[in-house]
Amino acid sequence: MATKEIILNKIQILITNNFNTPEEAFHFFDKDSDGKLSKSEIVKLLKEAEINGFIRGLVSSKLIEGYDKDGDGLINWEEFKFAIDEITDDSK
């Protein structure tokens, strides 16, 4: 199974190569424009980041579990930004 570092690196590559800013990426994957990423929207992000289909559901649950600070089961912009900042810091 892919390690957390590999998964986060793939997400960083996806965002860096396809979007001008993390905020642009967030809005692209926020398909219903509610200001939050649902599990299904995160799964689509992981698919675009070339995360294996078998583990996408598990990884999306773990990402929500790890970064959902307000406990609503969704990732809002601030939580997403925190995750991206953490990914960026880890890659330095």
Image (cartoon, grey):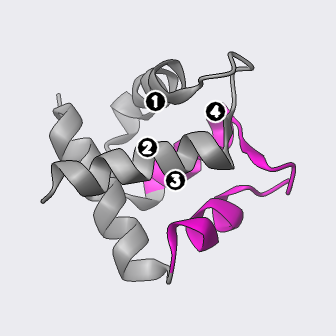
Q: Which amino acid does label 1 sit on?
A: Leu
- Marks 3/2: CA–CA distance: 14 Å
Label 2, on which residue? 83
- Marks 3/4: CA–CA distance: 10 Å
Label 3, on which residue? 45
Label 1, on which residue? 63
Q: What residue type is labelled 3?
A: Leu
User: What's the magenta bit mostly, secondary-structure-wise?
Assistant: helix
CB atoms of marks 1 and 4 within 8 Å: no
CB atoms of marks 2 and 1 within 8 Å: yes
Mark 1 neighbour class, 10 Å CA radius: few under 14, some 14 to 19, many 20 or more: some
CB atoms of marks 3 and 1 within 8 Å: no
Badge nearest the viewer, 3 or 2: 2
Q: Which amino acid does label 4 sit on?
A: Lys
Mark 3 neighbour class, 10 Å CA radius: few under 14, some 14 to 19, many 20 or more: many
Of pointers 3 and 4, the one earlier in the residue sequence: 4
> The residue tagged with tag 4: helix, strand or loop?
helix
> The residue tagged with tag 1: helix, strand or loop?
helix
Task: Tell whether position 26 is magenta.
Answer: yes
Q: Quadrant of the image for the C terminus?
A: bottom left
Badge nearest the viewer, 2 or 1: 2
Q: Which mark is residue 75?
A: none
Of pointers 2 and 4, the one earlier in the residue sequence: 4
> The residue tagged with tag 3: helix, strand or loop?
helix
Of pointers 3 and 1, the one earlier in the residue sequence: 3
Label 4, on which residue? 39
- Report the magenta residues as a range: 21-47
Mark 4 neighbour class, 10 Å CA radius: few under 14, some 14 to 19, many 20 or more: some
CB atoms of marks 3 and 2 within 8 Å: no
Q: In which quarter of the image is residue 30?
A: bottom right
- Marks 2/4: CA–CA distance: 15 Å
